[in-house]
Image (cartoon, rainbow, N blue to C red):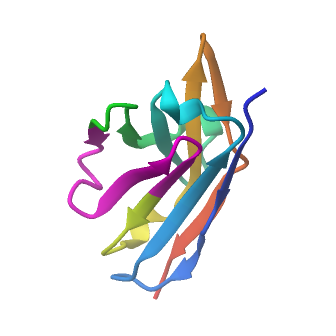
Amino acid sequence: QVQLVESGGGVVQPGGSLRLSCAATGDPFRLYAANWYRQAPGKQRDQSEFVATMTPFGTTNYADSVRGRFTISRTTPNTVYLQMNSLKPEDTAVYYCSVAISGTDYWGQGTQVTVSS
């Protein structure tokens, strides 16, 4: 089974930056798109908002709310990053990386990002 582990979350002031990491077992991102979602406070995980995606070919897409501030990247087939700059309080959420393989969605445990003055 594919396992994903997110890290890098924390508490930052508005305007600050964080880099989230997603480490996966195997090399899932060699063949499948890597995705970042975020679960806002008070929401269920299945209500998570799409943040960013990157295909094995390097094509990226972002939610309008983060475009220009966040960057998804992949340096190996089993590691994906989300660089978050110019953070806003509304970015506060639990951030998850995920991958869909043969109809099954795999999620990590999430990492908390809190943006507060």
> Left or right of 51: which side holds 32?
right
Which residue is depicted at the point 31% across and 38% down? Answer: 58
* Residue 11 location, quadrant: bottom right
Compared with residue 87, is residue 4 higher up or lower down, i.e. above or below?
above
Q: Nearer the viewer, residue 78 or 71?
A: 78
- Identity of the residue furthest to the top in this view: 102
- Provide residue 87's location: percent of width, then percent of height: 37, 73
* Residue 98 location, quadrant: top right
Compared with residue 88, is residue 62 higher up or lower down, i.e. above or below?
above
The quadrant the N terminus occupies is top right
- Please count the marks in the image: 0
Which residue is depicted at the point 32% across and 60% down? Answer: 70
- Identity of the residue furthest to the right in this view: 1
Which residue is depicted at the point 47% across and 38% down? Answer: 35
Compared with residue 69, is residue 63 higher up or lower down, i.e. above or below?
above
Which residue is depicted at the point 56% across and 53% down? Answer: 95
Highlighted range, magenta: 60-81
Residue 6: tell me if it is visible: yes
- Provide residue 60's location: percent of width, then percent of height: 29, 40
- Provide residue 20's location: percent of width, then percent of height: 53, 63
Residue 41: tell me if it is visible: no
Q: Nearer the viewer, residue 78 or 100?
A: 78
The reply to whether the magenta stretch includes residue 58 is no
